[in-house]
Structures are given as C-alpha cells and as structure tokens.
Amino acid sequence: MSALDLSVRHMTVMQAAQEDYAGADLELIFLNGSSLRVETIDGLGHRIAPTEQRGTGMPSTAKPLIHVVDDDASMRNALLMLLGEVGFDTRGYASTGEFLLEPVPDRPGCLLLDLTLPGPSGLDLQAALQRQNCMLPIVFLTGNATVTASVRAMKAGAVDFLTKPVQREVLLEAIERALASDAAHRRANEAVDQLQLRFASLTPRQRVVFERIVAGKLNKQIADELGIAERTVKREREQVMSKVHANSAADLGRLAGLREHFTET
C-alpha cells in the first residue's frame, strides 16, 4: 500500500460547536469531493448569506488553511496535493524552524505535523506554540511513533496521533475533528470578546449597581448603600440588563462568572 491511499471517495466535513453560546452563529463547512461550501446558520436555524465575520474582517467563506510540516519532500508534496484537491488552502514546511519563521495567519485551519524532524521535533514545536498561546489544532502524522510520544502529544492537546502510511479517509476525518476544534475555539473567543465589550459599555455607577445585583442585594439595599433613590437604582438596573443582554439577576451572575473565568485564564 502506498503512503497515501488516494482512492476517490466523497466525504462531508462539518464544523460544529462544542459549546453552546447563546446567540452565536453556527458555521458549517461542507466538503464533498473537490468542492467546498461554507454556510452560516443563526441561532434560529436560518441560513445567513456570506458576509464579513464580525470582528475579523475575513469573509465567512474563507477556506481553512492546513499547515503541513514534514521533512520528507515526497510525503509533504503528496499531502499538499491531496488536501488541495479536496478544497483546502495549504502551506508546506520542511522543519520546525521553517514553520516558526512564518507568522500563522488568523484564519480557520490546523497543523498536520510530523514527529521526527531535523532540529527541534514535532513535540518541541507543539510546546513552542503553546508558549506563544497559539491555539492552532495539531494532528500528528509520523512513521516513528512510540507510546511515550503519542501519550505526550495527546496530553498536550493534540487532536489525533496518526501513523504512516495513513488512509485518506482516516486522515481527512482527523482534519475534520481539528477544524471542528478550531471553529469552536474561535466562536468561544468571539463570545468572550462580545461579553467584554458589553461590560465595557457600562457606566461607573452601572458597574457598581451590577456588582451589588450579582451579590444578591435588593434595589432598596443598593439605593441605601449608594445614597440614591430606589427608582434610580431600578433605572440603572434596567440599563445594565439591556447592555449585557441579560434577562434576570441569575443571567447577570452567570455572565459575571464567565467574565471572571476568562479574565483569569
């Protein structure tokens, strides 16, 4: 069997959310043979026409970019050809250093990474990307697999650890999972960014009212503590709820917890 099973077979790749964020759009990428289609579905299940993604300036139809790091030129070129044929944008690198010399663009994608490379290994590159806070999902593909290496790679967050030769379907399924992970991470980041913007829109007094609401205090208690009228507290409370998109004090508490968690991390 050749290093890559290049038999023609149709597959469907779907990027689905791993977390349910209220109000978030769901981007689906359909890959069928050599054609690729991207659709965005809103929270009500309605299809959205392709537009600029909020906050990215990048068209929602941008194809995923698959980075291939492998020092075997024939294997690297075969992978690049296969991935290009099924509709992905690709970039090839012969070493860890070559990959690190090029900035990783902020676009959907993943990293297909050999384990044994000249100079720093694939595991070294994985560690370096973690130190740089680069969340590009990694699929290892190697002809020199060991149990120790595979365990280390998976514990460090690799999506999969494949061995050469690899069948076409197995490889594409692993890339599917990596792209789904990338999509979920991007949606989570966008949700956090939106949440931070909502809280930033609060006035100083609204922030004080918000903190006391989350602490479980009633309007009268807040009014007494701040030395303002209770109707003023009610008005500020309504503004807080509107600005952060909350429907209840419980919603405010949940949003406050999320904000605190992501601020710490």
Image (spheres, rainbow, N blue to C red):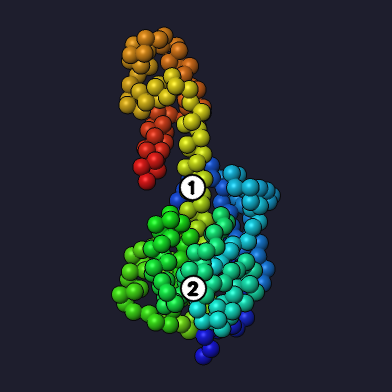
Three-letter code, disc 1: Asn
- Residue, disc 1: 189
- Circle on res. 223: none
Q: How many neighbours does mark 2 have within 10 angstroms: few (below 14), some (14-19), or many (20 or more)? A: many
Q: Nearer the viewer, residue 141 or 247?
A: 141
- Residue 138 screen position, x and y as percent: 46, 66
- Residue, disc 2: 95
Q: How many neighbours does mark 1 have within 10 angstroms: few (below 14), some (14-19), or many (20 or more)? A: few
Q: Residue at x 31, y 77 (%)?
A: 147
- Residue 100 screen position, x and y as percent: 49, 64
- Residue 18 screen position, x and y as percent: 46, 55
Question: Is residue 139 left or right of 15 when viewed as pictured?
Answer: left
- Residue 245 screen position, x and y as percent: 50, 32
Three-letter code, disc 2: Ser
Is the residue 127 above or below the residue 60 in the image?
below
Q: Choose the circle earlier in sequence order: 1 or 2.
A: 2
Q: Mark 1 to mark 2: distance in Å?
A: 30 Å
Residue 102 showing in the rendered view: yes
Q: Nearer the viewer, residue 150 or 244?
A: 150
> Extreme left residue here?
148
Q: Residue at x 43, y 54 (%)?
A: 133
> Extreme bottom residue here?
1
Quadrant in the picture for residue 146: bottom left
Q: How many tags in the picture? A: 2
Q: Nearer the viewer, residue 81 or 5?
A: 81
Q: Residue at x 36, y 28 (%)?
A: 214
Q: Nearer the viewer, residue 130 or 13?
A: 130
